[in-house]
Image (spheres, rainbow, N blue to C red):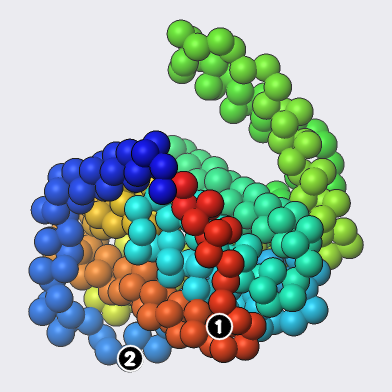
């Protein structure tokens, strides 16, 4: 290991340690509510786990389509294992991607298809996530349905799915919606960061990335779009199930924003899987959604147990299965991705 690599890893570990230290109160508050899970209706664990399995199945479907993989096995085991790995190491997103690449190559998927497929599926899934708050903000700003109630919240989930698919289809088929969005985002960025050189090519970049995704997916783009939207909607419904189990009556649009914030915080490379950031952000935003502080902490704990912690042992099992079926990953590739 070179001195530069050692120094970078040392800095990353120091940043992670400092972040966890600063976020310790939020983590202790959430995990300290473990004994309050007695107030959580136990039967709701089953639908929560089922919804998470469905959410992961959507990811596997998107990746299989994008990579044109012939078998499900390598896709499922590599995604579970790399996802778990990315949640236990600082800045694990890059390392997880490199790990999945190596596992898929070992599983017999052509490397060219792996590279293009992983890129296309990531762009599509994350693009859908970026669109989610755009559907919730109008409801909050202009007084659209914010009446509390889990029935309304679940209905919002269904409406969001339809709107996401419609918006995604429009962006894939036509240029104008994507160009308009790019211009708006570019203008906002230039106004906020006046001290920086103005950005001028965002609409063209969006079109270029859209075209690359469309070329990779081919005629299957509509299936991938449905699966990408389903991935987030099922995850959102998992959070709603946790709120149902504590008898919460949230404001649907604010819960959707709370969910989006949790997902964005989970992408921060400062701690593994956004640990601490997600707990702090989700409990605070759920309180704004009309959930009592104590209930928000319990719902956050239950949601994170199912969505964050449960996939880690599942990933370890998947790694063992993959190794037995296809052999060990290439250490050099994984190490390069971890830098």
- For label 2, count other residues whose C-alpha is less than 10 Å away and answer few (under 14), some (14-19) or many (20+): few
Residue 283 percent location from the top left of the image: 24, 56
Q: Eyeballing the image, is 55 above or below 254? A: below
| Residue occupied by mark 1 | 323
Identify the image quadrant of residue 251: bottom left
Mark found first going from the N terminus, 1 or 2: 2
Q: Residue at x 69, y 69 (%)?
A: 105
- Front position in the image: 261 or 116: 116
Q: Residue at x 27, y 47 (%)?
A: 13
Q: Eyeballing the image, is 23 above or below 296? A: above
Residue 255 percent location from the top left of the image: 38, 57
Residue 152 percent location from the top left of the image: 45, 66
Q: Is residue 6 visible?
A: yes
- Front position in the image: 282 or 249: 282
| Residue occupied by mark 2 | 43
Q: Residue at x 29, y 79 (%)?
A: 245
Residue 195's disc number: none
Q: Residue at x 75, y 54 (%)?
A: 116
Q: Secondary structure at mark 1?
A: helix
Q: Is residue 99 left or right of residue 142?
A: right
Q: CA distance from mark 1 to mark 2?
A: 35 Å
Q: Eyeballing the image, is 168 above or below 61? A: above
Residue furthest toward the right?
Answer: 219
Choose mark 1 or mark 2, whichever is in front: 1
Q: Eyeballing the image, is 123 above or below 177? A: below
Q: Secondary structure at mark 2?
A: helix
Q: Is residue 53 left or right of residue 279?
A: right
- Front position in the image: 200 or 19: 19
Q: Is residue 284 visible?
A: no
Q: Is residue 46 left or right of residue 161?
A: left
- For label 1, count other residues whose C-alpha is less than 10 Å away and answer few (under 14), some (14-19) or many (20+): some
Residue furthest toward the front?
Answer: 2
């Amino acid at each position: 290991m070179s001195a530069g690599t050692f120094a970078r890893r040392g800095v990353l570990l120091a940043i992670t340690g400092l972040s966890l230290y600063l976020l310790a109160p939020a983590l202790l508050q959430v995990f300290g509510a473990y004994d309050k899970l007695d107030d959580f209706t136990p039967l709701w664990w089953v639908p929560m786990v089922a919804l998470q399995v469905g959410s992961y199945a959507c990811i596997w479907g998107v990746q299989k389509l994008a990579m044109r993989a012939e078998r499900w096995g390598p896709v499922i085991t590599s995604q579970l294992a790399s996802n778990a790995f990315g949640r236990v190491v600082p800045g694990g997103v890059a390392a997880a991607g490199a790990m999945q690449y190596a596992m898929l190559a070992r599983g017999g998927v052509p490397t060219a298809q792996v590279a293009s497929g992983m890129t296309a599926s990531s762009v599509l899934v994350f693009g859908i996530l970026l669109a989610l708050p755009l559907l919730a903000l109008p409801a909050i700003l202009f007084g659209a349905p914010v009446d509390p109630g889990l029935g309304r919240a679940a209905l919002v989930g269904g409406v969001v799915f339809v709107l996401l698919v419609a918006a995604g289809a429009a962006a894939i088929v036509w240029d104008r919606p994507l160009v308009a969005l790019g211009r708006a985002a570019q203008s906002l960025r230039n106004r906020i960061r006046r001290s920086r050189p103005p950005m001028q090519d965002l609409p063209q970049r969006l079109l270029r990335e859209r075209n690359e995704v469309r070329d990779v997916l081919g005629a299957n783009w509509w299936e991938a779009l449905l699966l990408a939207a389903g991935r987030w909607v099922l995850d959102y419904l998992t959070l709603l199930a946790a709120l149902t189990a504590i008898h919460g009556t949230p404001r649907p649009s604010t819960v959707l924003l709370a969910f989006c914030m949790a997902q964005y915080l989970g992408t921060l490379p400062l701690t593994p899987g956004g640990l601490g950031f997600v707990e702090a952000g989700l409990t605070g935003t759920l309180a704004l959604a009309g959930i009592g502080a104590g209930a928000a902490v319990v719902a956050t704990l239950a949601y994170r147990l199912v969505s964050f912690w449960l996939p880690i042992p599942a990933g370890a099992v998947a790694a063992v299965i993959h190794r037995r079926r296809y052999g060990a990953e290439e250490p050099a590739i994984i190490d390069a991705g971890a830098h």
